[in-house]
Image (cartoon, helix red, strand yellow):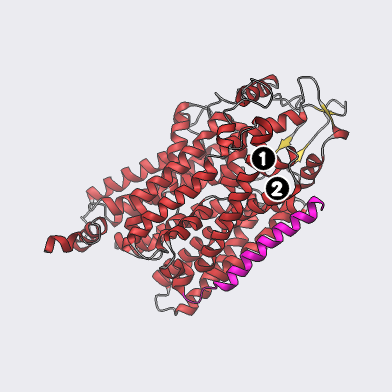
Amino acid sequence: MDLQTLTYIVVGFTFALYMGIAVWARAGSTKEFYVAGGGIHPVANGMATGADWMSAASFIGMAGLIAFMGYGGSVFLMGWTGGFVVLAMLLAPYLRKYGKFTVPEFIGDRFYSRGARIVAVICLIICSVTYVIGQMKGIGVAFSRFLEVSYDTGLLVGMFIVFFYAVLGGMKGITYTQIAQYCVLILAYTIPAIFISLNLTGNPLPQLGFGSTLVGTDVYLLDRLDQVVTELGFAEYTTQVRLSTTNMFAYTMSLMIGTAGLPHVIIRFFTVPKVKDARSSAGWALVFIAILYTTAPAVAGMARLNLMSTIEPAPGQHLAYDERPQWFKNWETTGLLKFEDKNGDGRIQYTADTATNEMVKVDRDIMVLANPEIAQLPNWVIALVAAGGLAAALSTAAGLLLAISSAISHDLLKGVIMPDISEKQELMASRIAMAVAIAGAGYLGFNPPDFAAGTVALAFGLAASSIFPALMMGIFSKRINKEGAIWGMIGGITVTLLYVFQHKGIMFIPGTSFLGGMDANWFLGIEPNAFGVIGALVNFGVANLVSRLTAEPPEEVQELVEHIRVPMGVTEAHDH
């Protein structure tokens, strides 16, 4: 069976499964729409959280960035996984104990202010819409290859699919759909990695194969990769640092605390029955996430080696363009891979020198999806990877859109503007908000400010500078009042946005990218994507200063903070 037919069958089957689940688990109430009724088992919720968390940035973008950034790409691995531990230990159980539907609702109640709730909604929408744009980039990449159409056409098709099952099912449908999507995406990620590791090193475990010698030689895979990239003028793969050590640290911290402040992940912990289940869910999610994240460095390194070795079999031996393999032609159709014959010799020169480099576009986001084709794996494996890429992008896009819609309908409409609205009207408003968010994010996805993982990193920085500090201070500090929280959030996200705009212009202008070289005017050499940690420090500083200069929170609010932090059953034990 040819690849295109097989891909249609595999992807079509997975989509039929997702849509069937969405119809079966259709939300009938606001509680089911927002938190799936609050009755999801911790293991199932951990799997759904894993799918929600491992977006197009993880499945498609992360390994692609590591493939070209080398060692410097480790910021994504350390930041995202480390952040999940922070979320599991410091935020999730306390927010679950509080028992509200959304993050802005907690902030509004804790800081006894509609104003705080509105600011939190605005911050949430800014972060989530930026994040969704990264998912839309991944959806466009995956659908363009799967359907063999342009990126723009692929994105339009993907928007329609997301609209169907996210708007219909709400959190209940999304949860069960994400469990299925996790199974698809993890198989799609690990099976090709096992094949390629076996082909290159003879070791079936990619994590170990990455540090092994190549088949039939005593040369280590990483040594060979270093040799290949340096011969073509690129930086050495294993020592390449992302701009500077300070920038690496800031980037890692921004991703870490941004993870703990992302509302679409936090909201998942409201779907389990008990507080203990929130911790358990986080533990299971970390296990499910680790399977992909420990495999990603191997996928990245092997993909880069396969790509370079195919186009440049040896120094000075350039592949003839007319003899380019089928995978090359397939990706050229999408517009994400482009060749320009600068010297007219009909051969492909791929070098680090932009003046002579004829591979004028190699989109980082194609690496994971193209890798099985480059490695000439069986067609069913290539089809499975296409299905996995789509599952990863669609699962997170759905979770993010739910966070956006619930912020608008539940926090803004029900909580502030129209408190007497009926449950049926609130549900309808939420679905309309989600549809508008899909349209807006899809439009912005036509000109994303970065590759999928880069755009997502920017969203993490915005969450780090606005939502994370407000949650941390809300849980662990009785002294922070409404004025402090409001001005802290405003100060943190404003500083971060101004820094991004100042150094890279207004987002979403075609051709704008956050992966350029070092800018002499960067603060402490920190790039825009990593600036969220500075915004967070501004947030903490402003909130504490303003709170010290204004009245203490009411006594009942301070008691609420105390209650949130005390484990269930402790007060009863003291009474006896």
Drawn side of residue 532 relative to residue 243, left or right: left
Q: Position of residue 469 (x, y in %)?
A: 36, 48
Q: Nearer the viewer, residue 223 or 350?
A: 223
Q: Which residues are magenta?
A: 1-29
Q: CA distance from mark 1 to mark 2?
A: 9 Å
Residue 422 sits in which quadrant?
bottom left
Q: Is residue 121 visible?
A: no
Q: Are marks 1 and 2 in contact (CB under 8 Å)?
A: yes
Q: Position of residue 472 (x, y in %)?
A: 33, 50
Q: Is residue 26 magenta?
A: yes
Q: Position of residue 33 (x, y in %)?
A: 49, 70
| Disc 2 target residue | 381
Q: Position of residue 252 (x, y in %)?
A: 45, 37
Residue 128's disc number: none
Instruction: Report the magenta stretch's main SS.
Output: helix
At 82% from the left and 37% from the top, the residue drawn is 325
At 47% from the left and 36% from the top, the residue drawn is 251
The residue type indicated by label 1 comes to Phe
Please rate how many residues cluster around mark 2, counting C-alpha atoms within 10 Å: few if below 14, some from 14 to 19, many from 20: many
Vertical side of 434 occupied by 228: above or below: above
The residue type indicated by label 2 comes to Val
Mark earlier in primary sequence (1, 2)? 1
| Disc 1 target residue | 195
Q: Is residue 413 magenta?
A: no
Residue 117 sits in which quadrant?
bottom left
